[in-house]
């Protein structure tokens, strides 16, 4: 085997050159995965590592990172919020991916990382001293134009109060609005986080909302749009708390809002809800605030306002009555005759010249016209008047009003301002007391995490709206040294709304949980109960209400014959304040259980509550009941503490 | 409590799409089909404001006072010292501003301007 000397030479050179060529190719023609970052980018990444910016509190605020048992996780669920594939759980890779993203050119500036993550960009520019001229996109002009045109000057927290007829609104809502230097509140930008859903079936809505099955989004709308929804359509009073954020702080907040605008996050009614997400906006403005890390399992909007107050953010509070509050107030300034006239006007029963034969004062005439106008708008939002009719009647009423001049006192400021919600009783309640049931004495302790009972001091709460969750009552009987669960109210809702010539609401209740029934064997036992009811109430919240309800009651439990019992019946009662600190509720109830374990249940009771201060009260309850022809009397006194 | 007639649970759905158009009296729903103003143009803002708040604004003009009327004065750059006269002017010319039940927001605005 011999080759010519030239060919051998060639083969040797090939053996050396070939690997050399491969190596050189790898260096100069690398696939993108192995590309080097531009040197300036590498410099910034190095500086970020040195400063340990991924550990910085502000980075965690902007990313909504929360400490978990193992590791860190962002509360945001939308993948569009993260630049790194593991950004949701890895602060380091997200930070580095963000810096790298600033070097990526974009066709549309608004799609670049500089705009999409404007708050991160501004913070990193400051921390790393980035020379933005060296970036493909040096700034987010659309944001700067917006700031220039609007000059935001102050931020206010708005609290539309509780609305029992909608599960989403039972505890009220919180949103922010941002006012601009030269414009009015109505034109300010509201920022509100809520669940987006097309659900119409109540229980599904409640279930999905509790378990984070809806996406939540931040929506930015003019404040007047939110007012139409809350004040004019939903008829909820709104409290507006002005915050003391400075202009640089507001700027930081707006940058972060920009980042969140189309980002979804799973919405949880009790945890990651409207109020909790607002904490992140406030912390983005002022990182020294301690709000989001104080979270203890659930967050009620009113408690978030208290927390914000404790952090020293609130400067003043103002009250905005809803349309129905205004209607009630205007009506209270007229006697029955005046109210009838206003009602007739709104219903189109009267022609022009309606005031000519009367001896009504000018102010009364003005009030009648204003009341008619407001009430007509109310009827229209309830779809009780067709559009064309509404337009004609509305114009006519307004024309009449315009001929009567200007009131000397401004209408709205006359609506009496109720107690600020954050000054009412706190949300958690614990009660200690003792009593007698039949011949047996007992001691009782009750714990209730939320929210407000009919008998609690009303100040700061929507009157007639009872909302109780997870109320647990334990009793101890010294006689046989037994400690037992007396009662567990899973939910106990009672909505008492009085009817008058203007409003005809239905009062309703829904109560479910464990409670004790008397059986034939003399010992009382726990059963599970579902007890809905509906009816009417009359009167008003100052003088007192009387009500009557139709109720059904379903009991489920092993102690019952056939394991269940279902019945129908009713209740009637009167509740009112005898004086400012003394409330009484007297009622009777009768249910005839005709299915399952048949029996008749009757009770008559008087409950009283004495307010010591907003967070302390004493309750005294006396009840006489009869089941299966066995009479029983129970009386107890409890001291209640709210915290 | 508030005057709620229905037992049905209401659902709040937030929509942020669409545009504010030419509006007549009769704002029923709580959700405005409004696009956020992308660029601040004075004329567009006043038009949108009047269109979106027809009913409440008319109410205030008839009364000669109110938050919606104040906001209009701010938007039209009426100096604070002249506002009382502005409100009285509008109230006494109510029928010239709101000429018919179907009057449009565009006409309302131009009627107001022709008074000034």
Image (cartoon, coloured by chain):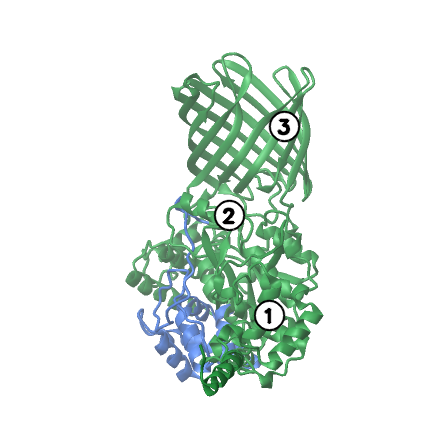
Chain colours: A green, B blue
Judged from the image, the secondary structure of the residue bearing numbered disc 3 is: strand
Using residue B47 as the reference point, say whether residue A348 is left or right of it: left
A421 is higher (above) or lower (below) than A281: above
Q: Nearer the viewer, mark 1 or mark 3?
A: 1
* Residue placed under numbered mark 1 in the picture: A96
x then y, percent, for residue B71 = 50, 73
Q: Earlier in the sequence, mark 1 or mark 2?
A: 1
- Which sits in the foreground, A295 or B106? A295
**Mark 3 chain:** A
Q: Quadrant of residue A27?
A: bottom right
Q: Earlier in the sequence, mark 3 or mark 2?
A: 2
How far is mark 1 from mark 2, CA to CA? 43 Å
> Badge 1, how many Cα within 10 Å: few under 14, some, many 20+?
many
Residue A106 seen by the camera: yes
* Residue placed under numbered mark 3 in the picture: A474
Give me the residue at 68% from left, 18% from top.
A481
* Residue placed under numbered mark 2 in the picture: A170
How far is mark 3 from mark 2, CA to CA? 27 Å
x then y, percent, for residue A567 = 40, 25
How far is mark 1 from mark 3, CA to CA? 55 Å
Q: Which mark is residue A270?
A: none
- As drawn, the residue found furthest toward the front would be A1
Q: Are marks 1 and 3 in contact (CB under 8 Å)?
A: no
x then y, percent, for residue A426 = 65, 46
- As drawn, the residue found furthest toward the top would be A521
Judged from the image, the secondary structure of the residue bearing numbered disc 2 is: loop
């Amino acid at each position: 085997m011999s080759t010519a000397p030239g060919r051998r030479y060639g083969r040797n050179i090939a053996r050396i050159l070939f690997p050399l060529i491969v190596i050189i190719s790898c260096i100069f023609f690398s696939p993108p995965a192995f590309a080097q970052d531009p040197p300036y980018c590498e410099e910034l990444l190095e500086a970020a590592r040195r400063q340990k910016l991924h550990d910085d509190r502000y980075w965690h605020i902007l990313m909504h990172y929360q400490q978990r048992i193992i590791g860190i996780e962002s509360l945001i669920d939308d993948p569009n919020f993260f630049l790194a594939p593991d950004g949701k759980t890895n602060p380091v890779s997200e930070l580095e991916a963000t810096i790298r993203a600033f070097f990526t050119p974009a066709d549309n500036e608004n799609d670049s990382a500089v705009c999409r993550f404007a708050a991160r960009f501004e913070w990193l520019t400051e921390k790393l001293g980035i020379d933005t001229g060296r970036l493909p996109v040096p700034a987010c002009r659309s944001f700067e134009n917006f700031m220039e045109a609007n000059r935001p000057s102050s931020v206010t927290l708005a609290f539309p109060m509780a609305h029992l007829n909608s599960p989403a609104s039972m505890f009220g809502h919180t949103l922010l609005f941002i006012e601009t230097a030269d414009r009015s509140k109505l034109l300010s930008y509201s920022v509100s986080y809520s669940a987006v859903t097309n659900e119409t079936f109540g229980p599904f809505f409640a279930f999905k909302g509790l378990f984070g099955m809806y996406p939540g989004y931040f929506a930015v709308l003019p404040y007047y749009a939110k007012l139409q929804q809350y004040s004019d359509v939903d008829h909820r009073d709104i409290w507006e708390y002005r915050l003391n954020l400075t202009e640089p702080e507001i700027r930081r907040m707006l940058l972060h809002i920009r980042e969140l605008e189309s980002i979804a996050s799973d919405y949880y009614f009790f945890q990651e809800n409207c109020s909790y997400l607002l904490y992140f906006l406030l912390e983005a403005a002022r990182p020294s605030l301690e709000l989001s890390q104080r979270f203890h399992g659930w967050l009620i909007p009113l408690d978030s306002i208290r927390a914000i107050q404790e952090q020293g953010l609130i400067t003043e509070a103002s009250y905005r009555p809803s349309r129905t509050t205004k209607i009630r107030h205007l009506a209270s300034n007229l006697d029955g005759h005046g109210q009838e006239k206003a009602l007739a006007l709104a219903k189109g029963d009267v022609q022009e010249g309606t005031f000519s034969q009367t001896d009504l004062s000018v102010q009364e005439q003005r009030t009648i016209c204003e009341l008619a106008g407001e009430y007509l708008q109310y009827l229209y939002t309830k779809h009780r008047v067709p559009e064309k009719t509404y337009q004609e009647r509305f114009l006519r009423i307004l024309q009449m009003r315009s001929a009567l001049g200007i009131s000397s006192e401004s209408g709205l400021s006359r609506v009496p301002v109720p107690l600020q919600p954050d000054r009412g009783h706190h949300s958690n309640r614990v009660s200690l007391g003792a009593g007698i049931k039949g011949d047996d004495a007992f001691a009782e302790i009750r714990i209730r995490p939320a929210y407000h009972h009919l008998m609690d001091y009303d100040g700061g709460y929507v009157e007639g709206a009872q909302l109780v969750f997870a109320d647990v009552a334990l009793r101890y009987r010294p006689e046989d040294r037994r400690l037992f669960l007396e009662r567990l109210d899973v939910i106990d809702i009672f909505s008492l709304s009085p009817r008058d010539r203007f409003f005809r609401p239905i009062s309703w209740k829904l109560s479910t949980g464990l409670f004790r029934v008397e059986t034939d064997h003399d010992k009382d036992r726990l059963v599970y109960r579902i007890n809905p009811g509906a009816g009417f109430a009359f009167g008003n919240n100052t003088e007192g209400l009387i009500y009557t309800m139709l109720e059904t009651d379903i009991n489920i439990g092993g102690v019952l014959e056939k394991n269940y019992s279902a019945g129908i019946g009713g209740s009637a009662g009167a509740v009112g304040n005898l004086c400012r600190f003394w409330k009484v509720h007297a009622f009777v109830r009768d249910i005839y259980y005709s299915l399952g374990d048949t029996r008749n249940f009757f009770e008559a009771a008087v409950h009283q509550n004495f307010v010591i201060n907003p967070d302390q009260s004493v309750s005294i309850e006396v009840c006489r009941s009869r089941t299966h022809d066995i009479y029983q009397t129970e009386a107890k006194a409890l001291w209640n503490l709210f915290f | 409590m508030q005057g709620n007639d229905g037992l049905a649970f209401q659902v709040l759905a937030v929509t942020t799409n669409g545009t504010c158009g030419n509006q007549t009296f009769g704002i029923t729903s709580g959700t405005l089909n409004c696009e956020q103003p992308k660029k601040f143009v004075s004329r567009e803002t006043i038009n949108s404001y009047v269109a979106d708040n027809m009913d409440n604004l008319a109410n205030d003009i008839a009364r000669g006072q109110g938050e919606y009327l104040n906001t209009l004065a701010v938007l039209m750059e009426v100096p604070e010292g002249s506002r009382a006269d502005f409100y009285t002017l509008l109230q006494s010319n109510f029928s010239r501003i709101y000429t018919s039940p179907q009057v449009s927001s565009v006409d309302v605005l131009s009627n107001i301007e022709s008074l000034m």
